[in-house]
Amino acid sequence: MSSAFPVATPPAAFSDVEPSIVARDVRKSYVGGDGGSLQVLDGVNLEVRPGEMVSIIGQSGSGKSTLLHVLGALDHADAGEVHIGGRHIASLREEALAELRGRSVGFVFQFHHLLREFSALENVMMPQLIVGTSERDARKRAEELLDLIGLMPRASHKPAQLSGGEQQRVAVARALANRPLALLADEPSGNLDPSTSERLHDLLFAVCREEGAAMVLVTHDLGLAARADRVLRLHGGELVAVGPEAGPPQAAE
Ligand code: ADP
Ligand code: MG
């Protein structure tokens, strides 16, 4: 049967490697505008292994950003467990949690959030300096990443002197600066035109494989989502595998 989506099970190559990121029965609710409770995550289970790429699709408001925040320890789950690099994050004190977040998780958001006053190179050095890497090593790694994303010639440019696509590539390099176990990307190309967006995804996929980072990519672009190893849909607060058996993409939405 032909389908735009890969099969839902992870490739065999990943099955005997320890997952970089694990979510078990994760639940989270918010208090809605009317004072009632809104159950956004209702038993999410996920394991992503080094070098594996998982994409998550789902309607607007289905909880995709909430899930990424919980997976990256930017937000707490109400119940269930999240493990990053084998560490149960709920058991960590704030200081250890901040350290884990800084070293082991890289985020790419829809809007790059680069520091405006700093050059591309300095933006990629920054997360490394924050965790205590020497300036020399941070510069070396930043140059290596800028080279990888094809932006060494723009190293001294500030964000305002870069195109939208270039800014997002710098944001990818910054997210990878500390060699994170997990790269979490929330509609990273949501703001870009289709061909720039496709190039950004090429880059994300290539660098994740190269660096062995586990990637969770949230995207509304089904074609790009389909290029990951697995595609999951967040629906009714749960992750559901999208595979050939799930029918065409439009039926999945
Ligand atoms: P998505 O990224 O899939 O569009 P979100 O995770 O941003 O969805 O939001 C899921 C739901 O939770 C939405 O209905 C949203 O309005 C609600 N929500 C998100 N953040 C908060 C918050 N801090 N307080 C209350 N409700 C929230
Ligand atoms: Mg969102």
Image (tube, rainbow, N blue to C red):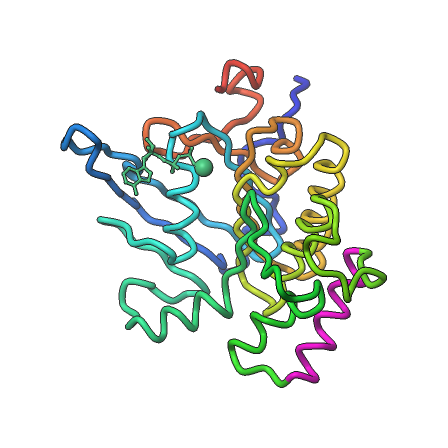
Region rendered in magenta: 135-149
Quadrant in the picture for residue 194: top right
Give left or right: position of 168 versus 195. left
Q: State the image coordinates of residue 88 (x, y, percent, origin top left).
A: 33, 64
> Where ligand 1 lies, by image quadrant?
top left
Q: What residue do we see at 66% from left, 49% from top?
A: 168
Was residue 147 drawn as part of the magenta stretch in this picture? yes
Q: Position of residue 153 (x, y in %)?
A: 85, 61
**Prevailing secondary structure class for the magenta stretch in the rendered image:** helix
Nearer the observer, 249 or 122: 122
Q: Is residue 195 left or right of residue 54?
A: right
As drawn, is 27 to the left or to the right of 109? left
User: Which residue does the image show at 67% across and 36% down from the upper left?
Assistant: 192
Left/right placement of residue 159 relative to residue 126 reads right
At 46% from the left and 28% from the top, the residue drawn is 58
Vertical order, 223 against 20 (above or below): above
